Amino acid sequence: MSTDLLPLARQILAGQAFSALLGTELEVFEPGRAELSLAVRPQLLQQHGFVHGGVLSYLADNALTFAGGTVLGDSLTAEYKINYLRPAKDAQRLLAVATVLGSGKTQAVVRCDVFTLHEGGERKQVAAAQGTIRKAG
């Protein structure tokens, strides 16, 4: 799959109402890899001031599926697991970096690391996920 598919992949992301609501952006879409990001806003925080775990989980899930889609085409998440490593706090953006670990004709195993991005370029890993992505249809 060539990198000139980035505009089409961004169009697909824009068609996801929840992703549009959150303001998610597709930064990278290339064979075996996808990166999604979103700005941290007060509406995404839980009562302790950390980014809500559901937001981190959403971002990982979507990045896993987009990365899987780079090798499978139209895809869906079959399953995934996420580990929260530390609270996501005091960040400007979140970044989910997903990489295909292995794939066949109908499914792929994908890993995703979620980072907070801070002023001055500092980046801290806050979650790690792995999932099985299946070809749709």
Image (cartoon, rainbow, N blue to C red):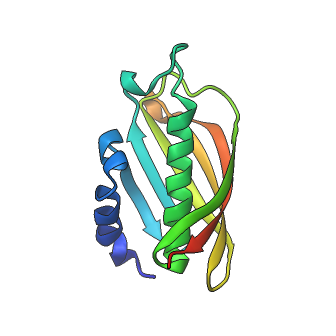
Across the whole image, how many numbered discs are drawn on residues? 0
Of the pair 123 and 98, the residue shown nearer to us: 98
The percent position of residue 103, horizontal first and vertical second, equals 66, 78
Residue at (63%, 38%) from the top-left corner? 125
Q: Is residue 113 visible?
A: yes
Identity of the residue furthest to the front in this view: 137
Of the pair 110 and 4, the residue shown nearer to us: 110
Using residue 16 as the reference point, say whether residue 49 is left or right of it: right
The percent position of residue 82, horizontal first and vertical second, equals 68, 45
Quarter assignment of residue 43: top left
**Quadrant of the snapshot with the N terminus:** bottom left
The percent position of residue 85, horizontal first and vertical second, equals 70, 34
Q: Is residue 116 visible?
A: no
Of the pair 27 and 76, the residue shown nearer to us: 76
The percent position of residue 132, horizontal first and vertical second, equals 66, 65
Of the pair 107 and 120, the residue shown nearer to us: 107
Residue at (51%, 75%) from the top-left corner? 136
Quarter assignment of residue 4: bottom left
Residue at (62%, 25%) from the top-left corner? 87
